Amino acid sequence: MKLKKKKNRRSDFKVMTKEAKALKFLREARGLSMRKAGLVLGTSDAFVNHSEHGRIDLTPNIIMRFLNAYGFEYEYFKKIVEGKIDIPESQLEECIGLLKRMSPEKLKTVKTILQSF
């Protein structure tokens, strides 16, 4: 039995870039699901997913397509990518890291505080 050699596809691996994270942030800022974003872009939700999760190379044309669809200026996007505007997701990741290192007693206290919000 002869085995077929699997083609290497760009979508087979992730390369998480600041641009991909920024696109996800901008979509969420507009309150769009991936499906709705795909409709706004005139493409599939899989394309949105692959764009945000580093499974396709983001060309300037693709980035501008997202920015135009979401109603953001390139300069704003550039500031996010350069780290001049903080993405809340990075804060969430930092908080999760802190929580993982806490003792069970401290976690109970933090849980009580968070439930009060």
Image (cartoon, grey):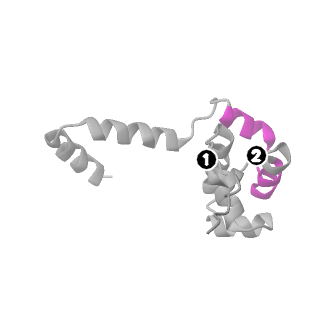
* Mark 1 secondary-structure assignment: loop
Q: Quadrant of residue 2?
A: bottom right
Q: Is residue 5 left or right of residue 67?
A: left
Q: Which mark is residue 49?
A: none
Dot 1: few (<14), some (14–19), or many (≥20) neighbours within 10 Å? some
Main secondary structure along the magenta-highlighted residues? helix
Residue 26 location in percent, x, y?
A: 66, 50
Does the magenta segment cover residue 79? Answer: yes
Q: Is residue 116 left or right of residue 57?
A: left
Q: Nearer the viewer, mark 2 or mark 1?
A: 1
Residue 61 or 113: which is nearer the viewer? 61
- Residue type at mark 2? Leu
- Residue type at mark 1? Lys
**Tag 2 near tag 1, CB within 8 Å:** no
Q: Which mark is residue 58?
A: 2
* Mark 2 secondary-structure assignment: loop
Q: Residue at x 74, y 35 (%)?
A: 78
- Return the residue found at the far right: 61
Q: Residue at x 66, y 45 (%)?
A: 20
Q: Residue at x 67, y 54 (%)?
A: 11
Residue 76 or 3: which is nearer the viewer? 3
Label 2 vs label 1: CA separation? 12 Å
Dot 2: few (<14), some (14–19), or many (≥20) neighbours within 10 Å? some
Q: Residue at x 69, y 59 (%)?
A: 48
- Return the residue found at the far left: 105
Does the magenta segment cover residue 73? Answer: yes
Residue 21 location in percent, x, y?
A: 62, 44
What span is colored magenta in the figure?
64-81
Q: Looking at the rendering, in which quadrant would you find the N terminus? A: bottom right
Residue 12 location in percent, x, y?
A: 63, 53
Q: Quadrant of residue 109?
A: top left
Which residue bears the numbered disc 1?
Answer: 14
